[in-house]
Amino acid sequence: MADKKWLPRWFFQLASPRWCYQITGRLLPWFLLATLILLAGGTVWSLLFAPADYQQGNSFRIIYLHVPSAILAQSAYMLMAVAGAIGLIWKMKMADMVLKSAAPIGASMAVLALATGAIWGKPTWGSWWVWDARLTSMLILLFLYLGIMALNSAIENESTAAQASAVLALVGVVNIPIIKYSVEWWNTLHQPATFKLTEKPAMPPDMWLPLLVMVIGFYCFFAVSLMQRLRNEIIWRERRASWVRELLNKQ
Amino acid sequence: MSFNSVSEFLAMGGHGLYVWLSYGLGAGVIVANLILPKLSRNRLLAEQKRRLRREETA
Amino acid sequence: MSTGTNPENMQKVSALALFMATMRREFLLSFRRKSDLANPLIFFLMVATLFPLGVSPEPGFLAQLAPGVVWVAALLATLLSMDALFRSDYEDGSLEQLLLSPQPLFVAVLAKVSAHWCMTGLALTVMAPLLAVMLFLPAEGMPGLMLSLLLGTPTLSLVGAIGAALTVGLKKGGVLISLLVLPLYIPVLIFGSSAVQAAVTGLPLGGYLALLGALLALALALAPLAIAAALRISISS
Amino acid sequence: MSTGTNPENMQKVSALALFMATMRREFLLSFRRKSDLANPLIFFLMVATLFPLGVSPEPGFLAQLAPGVVWVAALLATLLSMDALFRSDYEDGSLEQLLLSPQPLFVAVLAKVSAHWCMTGLALTVMAPLLAVMLFLPAEGMPGLMLSLLLGTPTLSLVGAIGAALTVGLKKGGVLISLLVLPLYIPVLIFGSSAVQAAVTGLPLGGYLALLGALLALALALAPLAIAAALRISISS
Amino acid sequence: MSEPLLKVSQLYCERDDRVLFSHLDFALSAGEIVQIEGQNGSGKTTLLRILCGLSRNYEGEILWRGEPVQDVREQFCREMLYFGHQAGVKAVLTPEENLRWYAALQPNIAVADIQAALERVGLRGYEDVPCHSLSAGQNRRVSLARLYLSRAPLWILDEPFTAIDKQGVAAKEKLLLEHARRGGSVILTTHHELGIEGPVRKINLDQLAGTSA
Amino acid sequence: MSEPLLKVSQLYCERDDRVLFSHLDFALSAGEIVQIEGQNGSGKTTLLRILCGLSRNYEGEILWRGEPVQDVREQFCREMLYFGHQAGVKAVLTPEENLRWYAALQPNIAVADIQAALERVGLRGYEDVPCHSLSAGQNRRVSLARLYLSRAPLWILDEPFTAIDKQGVAAKEKLLLEHARRGGSVILTTHHELGIEGPVRKINLDQLAGTSA
Ligand code: HEM
Ligand SMILES: Nc1ncnc2c1ncn2[C@@H]1O[C@H](COP(=O)(O)OP(=O)(O)OP(=O)(O)O)[C@@H](O)[C@H]1O
Ligand SMILES: Nc1ncnc2c1ncn2[C@@H]1O[C@H](COP(=O)(O)OP(=O)(O)OP(=O)(O)O)[C@@H](O)[C@H]1O
Ligand SMILES: [Mg+2]
Ligand SMILES: [Mg+2]
């Protein structure tokens, strides 16, 4: 343990499933409240009050779902890779659980980003799908998610499954910049920038403020969903521990 | 407020289908992500309680 | 028992011996059943024949397709042969013995992957000109094709072996492995086919080859360790 | 012991029971590991993504490729999943038991192939529109694509099973099977992709579909017997 | 019962230019247990696979109830149970599901008996566990449960006691004896000393190996 | 030799909610033979896989020459021989080729001894036959030849006598005894009654299975 002195105390508390269960239990209602307020407020704002884009008209409102889900899909993968590294290095069970719980949420965000993008593409580009760099790398990200989920579900033993997914997540994260870079280069090489995504335009504040609200709302939603799944996972894995027994008896 | 009437709001300047499809999908994904863990939690707790009871009697 | 005079050195010698012995064993295993050796090649050839049949037999059109199709075929041929890399060792218990050896695991793993590459990637590279002719690839593209395959296929073998190691404990890993590995193959595919296209159009292809080389260096450095870790994890359940 | 009142009839009943039990078992085997079910589909999807990446992302060009690529992808996805059809039964000894059953072997074989088709061919057909959109296949081609896949994929499963049965006794049959089976797949590929192309260009496609149907009828009549015979030969070595 | 169930005459088999057995003659009547003996590699498995019809790599004649076995194949399969080196157990299925499929293969097995058979091989409580989570011996037991289900008169068993613990072996030996008493007959190989007192006949293959000339 | 070779303390393992063993303590000194006993499914294989380091699915401590085994992994692997349920024999290679590769894995094995070892397991004349043309028992013998090559002090053997004929078993039992006399030690499982007279200690897992609470 001598070599772990430099790590702060809370890091080791994190390793305790019981402590995590309790702390997430206390945080969960607040995050849920924040999620509901931010998402409801953001949706109303973006649908009713944000101005329409002068070029794209009202289809522009899809951005308020599209961008948060795309950002979240990428962040969730980073989180998984970090959790995987921690799980492999310090053999921390909680990190394994985070990795496993984050995967389906991240995958559903990637699906949402792809679906909203595709829907948006139809009115703007006249086609559901275009082999653009951003789109392609999002699709590959979805494949990476699906791979991790499939591997996780194919291995019966929990800790083996967690470690195998961690290795895969790490290999994937090494590859993400390579994939992004290669895909971008490939596209600019083959195809002139006919359909280039509008690089962050100088949006007026009443356009990007609701976007900010939505992004924060999505992060809160991610936290809520992650904590819910995490708590389930904790109960399942610790089902033999006495504190879970007491917890079950209390309810 | 960018819209003058409900029908205008629903039409979204001709892009109603796309916008509402997106928001519907978004709502679906988010709600599913909140509800499914809740359901599986209920199932898990019931299962474990049953197991505890079984072990107590055994 | 035999600590020798210079243990450090002894260790290196015996690791080298393990590398050679493992290579030798893998080659023996393949040569014993000659069909195994020919199969990836014939598969490669057949995927390339499917295209003219399924898409269009027109030379001009095919020439445009050729760089991509050759690369996709090489990629699929590698992928197909990947699943068998560790599976038979797992099933007959040799893999357990390998894991329990005092020798560094990554050495044996590297030997297995090298042997695999010689029998798929290298062989595909040698075969590629035949395919290129069948698909009417212009002659200028040929050096680019060969060089890019030579630099790209080892990466495919190394990365594919990670997937094989992760799925070795599972029944029917065959399809799961493609799911895990294909996304990781995409950069190689892109740079590889771009190199061929550049060669066809007379553009400089040094950049692409350098990139493929960089990917290979990265894979050579990291993949053996990842494979070794994945094998230990898969077995320890 | 239980010769029953009408042995002829009894036999039919028990053969039907065997068919149902085998189907049920195959579905169970797949559903137990949910990923197995999704894998051929995801593979299908990924092969289709490789093409734009390897060849060219340009919609016009891809649209021309689309019928062929979708069909080649379906063919490869079926081929890849074929090897597992009898192998695990062979390895754990269930195949011996199947051969020693007094029931007609071709019934069990037909059940296995049907289950396999439901989980690959049928599923691929349902997925195909997604692929078609990704490859910019014109909307007019869609019905032709679906119909041709619906009629063609069962033939692929049946013919592939013959190859699987012939190679089941060999280690590493994975690539050998493609070698045996691909040539037999070519007519299906040609008629299938022609049907789609005809649909895209607005030509009548009844002829192609009739041909695919005829191939299917032929395969349905002959393949189960061929598979049964091949299995007996493979085992009795 | 004047006619033997199974009659083998002048059976000859060689592998890789080595004669495993030649001039092998024996007859098996109802109620008999025959143990094939021999060293490792003497040809026991090969003989059993020939007898049950899995291998056709032999010369000589095999009669089932007086008729050449290849002519009455279906009848023979109906009345024979083969238990080979591999157990024929699917790893992802539970013991019960495995046996259900087996019952579909053999029409005269009653599905209703499966539970009882599993209980008798000591797998009670494991009915719902997939077989890959069972031990080596438990996997063999799943397959051995078929002996309790079978109504076939002829059992051909290739090392049925591999990986089975002592109590298990004793129970199976009793079962074989019962089967013989009911008029069934058994051909088996095992390297283990049979604890059966009764009508066990031994055939030693080591003496039957021809010269390799 | 005051310090035991291997010392296990408070070993605990559960699988699928069933405790296989808990509070398992034992020490193994040089010259000892320990037989792990237990019914099918009692956890013998699981225990051996934990001891040799293939499975990490346990709680408790395992010391090798006084140090935690995970800290001296390489040293431990060098001094240990594991023989598992699967023989680790490649079917298309000949017995000799199989053993050559094995010799490369274990640096202190001399390649020159391989011929002698094959002869001692009764495979003389089969050195050049691919293993898929050998019988079940002969395949196991190829792997058992490793015992004659090994210089490792600790042998961990999981049912080494499966499929081996009687003479073969007797020879292997003698070998174990010799190994113990030379100061080696053995942990093994077998369902067969050991004919060894000497320092055999038995550990019964059936009594160690905790309540599933
Ligand atoms: C399936 C189709 C699409 C996918 C997969 C996709 C994916 C992405 C991704 C990954 C981002 C980056 C989010 C970030 O990290 O900031 C993004 C941002 C964005 N997308 Fe899309 N997109 C798609 C279609 C579209 C369409 C059709 C439009 C509109 C014409 C569009 C407009 C935007 C805008 C304006 C941004 C924000 C740019 C920025 O913040 O950098 N996208 N999209
Ligand atoms: N992969 C696995 N996953 C979960 N449980 C398992 C697994 N393998 C074995 N088990 C369980 O662990 C228990 C012990 O198995 P193990 O193989 O150690 O038994 P064993 O004592 O070696 O039996 P045998 O004498 O049959 O070889 C069994 O009851 C089995 O149900
Ligand atoms: N597939 C094969 N091809 C060629 N020869 C074979 C094959 N299988 C077995 N043999 C040879 O046939 C002989 C008999 O093998 P068989 O498996 O019948 O022996 P066995 O008596 O069952 O031995 P064991 O007690 O080890 O199970 C062996 O000497 C072996 O070399
Ligand atoms: Mg045998
Ligand atoms: Mg065991």
Image (tube, coloured by chain):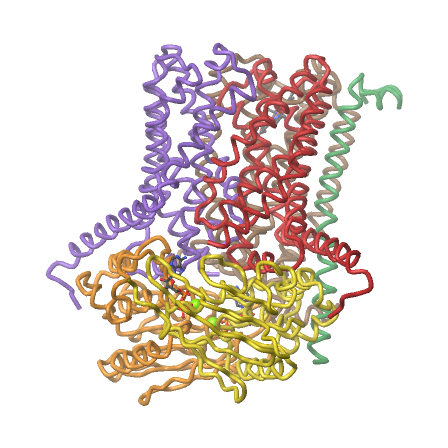
Chain colours: A brown, B green, C purple, D red, E yellow, F orange
Residue A213 is at least partly visible in this image: no
Between E140 and F178, which is closer to the camera in this rendering?
E140
Q: Nearer the viewer, residue C126 or A52?
A: C126
Residue D40 drawn above or below residue D5: above
Residue F86 falls left or right of residue D96: left
Q: Position of residue F91 (x, y in %)?
A: 37, 56
**Quarter occupied by the N terminus of chain E:** bottom right
Q: Position of residue F211 (x, y in %)?
A: 59, 80
Residue A138 picture quarter: top right
Please state which of residues A63 and E8 is positioned toward the viewer in this rendering.
E8
Query: Picture quarter containing residue A118?
Result: top right
Residue A133 or residue D220, whichever sits in front: D220
Residue at horizontal 75 percent and vertical 43 percent from the top = B31
Vertical relation: B26 (above or below) C100: above
Q: Is residue D178 visible?
A: yes
Q: Residue furthest left?
A: C5
Q: Classify E141 as above or below A165.
A: below
Left or right: E96, with E165 as reference point: right
Q: How many marks?
A: 0
| Picture quadrant where residue C188 is located | top left
Residue D157 % position (x, y): 61, 39
Q: Residue at x 76, y 66 (%)?
A: D3
- Residue at the (68%, 17%) spot, across then down: D138
Where is residue D78? Give x, y as percent.
58, 37
Q: Report the residue at 66% width, 26% height from top.
A: A117
Specify the quadrant that holds the C terminus of chain E: bottom left
